[in-house]
Amino acid sequence: MADFEQRYRALSRQFHPDYFYNAPAAERRGALEKSSYLNDAYRTLKSPIARIEYLLKLEGFEQSAGGGRQSGPPQSLLEEVFALNEELDEVREQKAVEPLEVALELKQPPPRASRPHGGGRDLSSDVPPMRLPRHPCR
């Protein structure tokens, strides 16, 4: 891989567009195309997956569109999401019709027996009354 890197760097210096700033337009364009082609080739050969895909393509094994992967979510998933969104819209409409009932249900405290502390008994009797200290001037 070190030889690969060295050869890429040498070719990159040779064809870099900055070295052709005083050259005619055709040469500048050619250097830019060669540099772009070199960079694409380097990225393809450096990545193991991209390299395998390229080699398979050379051997005639074409991939389906999207790299063998689906281009979007499956149709069944889209249908399920659509159905869930319709149900959600119905729930929202129902809540818009009955806003006061929903608000009252949310504001009611839970029954005492269902509270986790104290097991449903009144804890206020367990706390002694608070006594304030006497003021020193009295």
Image (cartoon, rainbow, N blue to C red):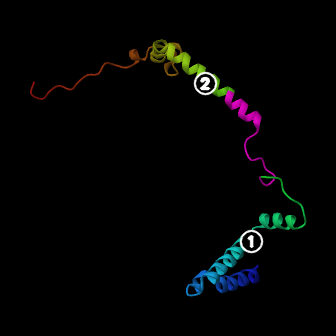
Residue beneath the point at 83% across and 53% down: 64
91 sits to left or right of 47: left
Residue 68 shown in magenta: yes
Does residue 118 appear anywhere in the picture?
yes
Residue beneath the point at 76% across and 39% down: 74
Asked whether 81 or 58 is in front, the reply is 58
Does residue 120 appear anywhere in the picture?
no
Q: Which residues are magenta?
A: 66-82
Which numbered marker is on residue 82? none
Q: Amino acid at mark 1?
A: Lys
Asked whether 125 or 31 is in front, the reply is 31
123 sits to left or right of 53: left
Q: Position of residue 134 (x, y in %)?
A: 17, 25
Q: Position of residue 6 (x, y in %)?
A: 71, 84
45 over 110 or under it: above or below: below
How far is mark 2 from mark 1, CA to CA?
Answer: 48 Å
Q: Position of residue 127 (x, y in %)?
A: 37, 20
17 sits to left or right of 48: left
**What residue does disc 1 label?**
46
How many neighbours does mark 2 have within 10 angstroms: few (below 14), some (14-19), or many (20 or more)? Answer: few
How many neighbours does mark 1 have within 10 angstroms: few (below 14), some (14-19), or many (20 or more)? Answer: some
* SS class, disc 2: helix
**What residue does disc 2 label?**
88
Q: Amino acid at mark 2?
A: Leu
Residue 17 shown in magenta: no
